[in-house]
Image: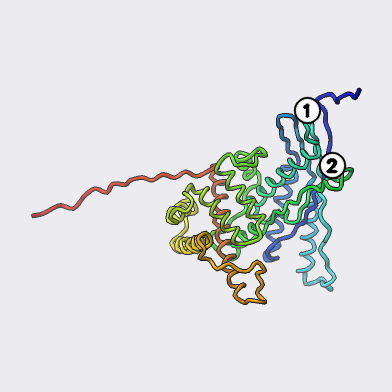
Amino acid sequence: MELEASLPSSTVIELVLLMGTGRSISDDHWEEIDAAHIDVWEKAKSLFHVREYKNDTSTIRIELDWGPVLVRLRQRFQTMSRIFDPAVKNKELIRFPQRSIRVKCNVTVTREKRTKMQPVHDALHYTESFLHDVFLILNLAAPGCCSFARATLRPRQGYAPWLRGAELSLSDYPFDNAYMGHYWEKWPAPKILELEMVAQWYLAVRSGINQIPDNRAQKVLFALMHICKTDTALDTIIWLFYALETLYDTQPGENRRALTNRIGLVLSPNDKQRAYLKNELRRLYDIRSGFAHGGLEIAHPMNNEVLDKRVEDKFRELMDSSDFGFAILLASVQNTIERGCIEFNFRETIIELPVTASVTT
């Protein structure tokens, strides 16, 4: 007779996160931006070292060692310093580290009740969810500082070959591109926020592993994740409207005037910026409407500008509009964080203007 293991029982699962670093846009202003990224990762190393979840049967404790990320970021900074140092010769021989960063992850799964779920599956699922949260928190604090575009989470050893883990596919490009508006004198220009403040706000909005949103703010966060997994600008625009209309509490497809006015209330543009906002939002609305009703000229799936020169112009038009929309969304979310609120609610008021003119006969 086989004896069943007594409860509670704990199993330690060793996982590894393979990831890279480096910015998606360019090396412009690298000294200031890379230094800021190192600073935020210094704080992230301890802030995101341990995360614990509980469900009906188990406690899942995740421990991550982010030290290798900091090592790579410092190596990159030193390499860039050598490249831009006029005293250094033979710069063509300077190389950036190419190997993936290996972030060790130990997950302890403690069973309080019996379940058919294998501990390794719990470890993978919960860690993948936590990494999605880490990605957003870091990029909301310092846009462009974290990329999981080619990141893979997998068991270190001792498991069946088919258990390959998860590809995160979360790109930092939208965040990095939006933050560069700070240097390109674009409006709105997202900023760098205190990591602790962003993490505190995020955990107030989402502290669990639910896959269906429980509130409006979670809808916005999930939309941001979808945008960072999206390859095409047109898909991004659809998600942008989902997020903006949710954040600003407007009805889907409602007249753009309401959305324009509410964004203006939150981001406080000057007259020139307000005119730019109205113009660019109209472009976004036209693209969405054209796609929904069949009026938009969509490109062949190849998107080959060699075969058709018009592809590049169409692609740039979509990219410019989606870049603007993401900058609006990111600046708006950062604004809610700075205000310390979870969501915006708006109300209409009637202002009565008294009759002042006298009537003469």
User: How far across and down, in percent of the image, does residue 354 sit?
Assistant: 24, 48
- Classify residue 32 by image quadrant: bottom right
User: How far across and down, in percent of the image, does residue 62 sit?
Assistant: 77, 39
How many numbered dots are placed on residues in this image?
2
Describe residue 23's horizontal placement relative to residue 259 as left or right.
right
Describe residue 302's horizontal placement relative to residue 78 as left or right.
left
* Residue 280 visible here: no
- Classify residue 160 by image quadrant: top right
Label 2 crowd bin: few (<14), some (14–19), many (20+), radius 10 Å: some
Name the kind of residue labelled 2 in the image: Glu
- Which element carries disc 1, helix, strand or loop? loop
Distance from the alpha carbon under mark 1 to that under mark 2: 22 Å
Residue wearing tag 1: 114
Tell me which residue sits at (80%, 56%) in the image.
72
- Viewer-side residue, 149 vs 234: 234
334 to 321, vertically: above or below: above
Q: On residue 44, which mark appears? A: none
Describe residue 180's horizontal placement relative to residue 149 as left or right.
left
User: How far across and down, in percent of the image, does residue 17 sit?
Assistant: 79, 49
Label 1 crowd bin: few (<14), some (14–19), many (20+), radius 10 Å: some
**Quadrant of the drawing holding the N terminus:** top right
- Classify residue 306 by image quadrant: bottom right
Work out whether mark 1 precedes mark 2 in sequence or the reverse, and give the earlier one.
2
Name the kind of residue labelled 1 in the image: Arg
Direction right: furthest residue: 1
- Viewer-side residue, 256 vs 298: 298
Residue wearing tag 2: 14
151 to 129, vertically: above or below: below
User: How far across and down, in percent of the image, does residue 316 sit?
Assistant: 59, 69
